Image: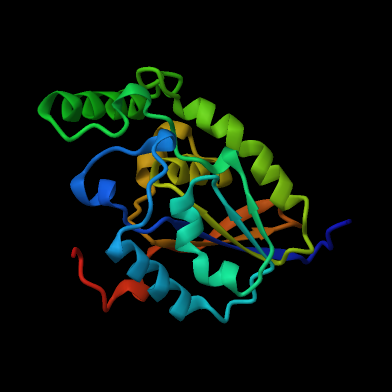
Amino acid sequence: MQARADLVKDIYLIRHGETEYNRKGVVQGSGIDADLNELGQKQAAAFFAHYQDLPIDKIYTSALKRTHQSVKGFIEKGLPWEQHVGLNEISWGNKEGKSPNTADDLYYKNLTKTWREGNVHVQSEEGESPVEVLERQKPVVDLFLSRPEEKAILIAMHGRAMRVLLTHLFNAPLHQMDNYAHQNLCLYHLQYDYAAQEFRLVKGNCAIHLANLPESM
């Protein structure tokens, strides 16, 4: 289908709700397929209650169930839904699922510092680099942009992967990915202008829909 020059696509991009791993400060990555915890389920319900009337044409999620559960209300409305491994969280390799400790905390601090310094090809131990995450995301971006008839889409994914994706969408250097703040069940509202072939930010890291929820349970 040929896109009209005046066509704009609304993209509602969210990070999944809280899991017990999030609550305990344990890294999940793509290798841990955790469920939302009680607070995460409440976050998902609050997001749906606030945005259920959006005219969403398609839901895109990662292949991990915490993203599916985060958009459960929209899926249950019968909206078209696709899962894509390309939207999965970064693989943290042999660090996934480990309880927080001083050595691993230092490891993550040094690794993310390395990435911020521009060394985005560096992988986590037995895991992925930001460049590798971006390369598997690009076909998914190309796919949803090739569907201008989907005027509004909802994408549910993961924190680090979201940061990687946002640098790509806004043509920012990948080493600046930490500039994109996020929290569980936050919303980034973007628009893609087909004529200008560019994304613009409407709102970022928005959590107004969570205002009446506790920070922890």
Q: Residue at x 76, y 65 (%)?
A: 7
- Residue 134 placement, left or right of 89: right
How many numbered callouts? 0
- Residue in the foreground of this view, choosing between 47 and 166: 47
Q: Residue at x 72, y 51 (%)?
A: 145
Q: Residue at x 55, y 45 (%)?
A: 63
- Residue in the foreground of this view, choosing between 107 and 35: 35
Image color mode: rainbow
Q: Residue at x 69, y 63 (%)?
A: 80
- Residue 38 placement, left or right of 77: left
Residue 39's x, y, as percent?
A: 28, 65
Above or below 47: residue 69: above
Image quadrant in which you'd find residue 104: top left
Q: Quadrant of the N terminus?
A: bottom right
Extreme-left residue of the structure: 102
- Residue in the foreground of this view, choosing between 68 and 132: 68
Q: Quadrant of the C terminus?
A: bottom left
Image quadrant in which you'd find residue 120: top left
Residue 113's x, y, as percent?
A: 28, 27
Above or below 19: residue 12: below
- Residue 53 placement, left or right of 27: right
- Residue 194 placement, left or right of 192: right
Residue 81's x, y, as percent?
A: 65, 59
- Residue in the foreground of this view, choosing between 193 and 50: 50
Residue 159's x, y, as percent?
A: 39, 46
Extreme-right residue of the structure: 1
Above or below 178: residue 208: below
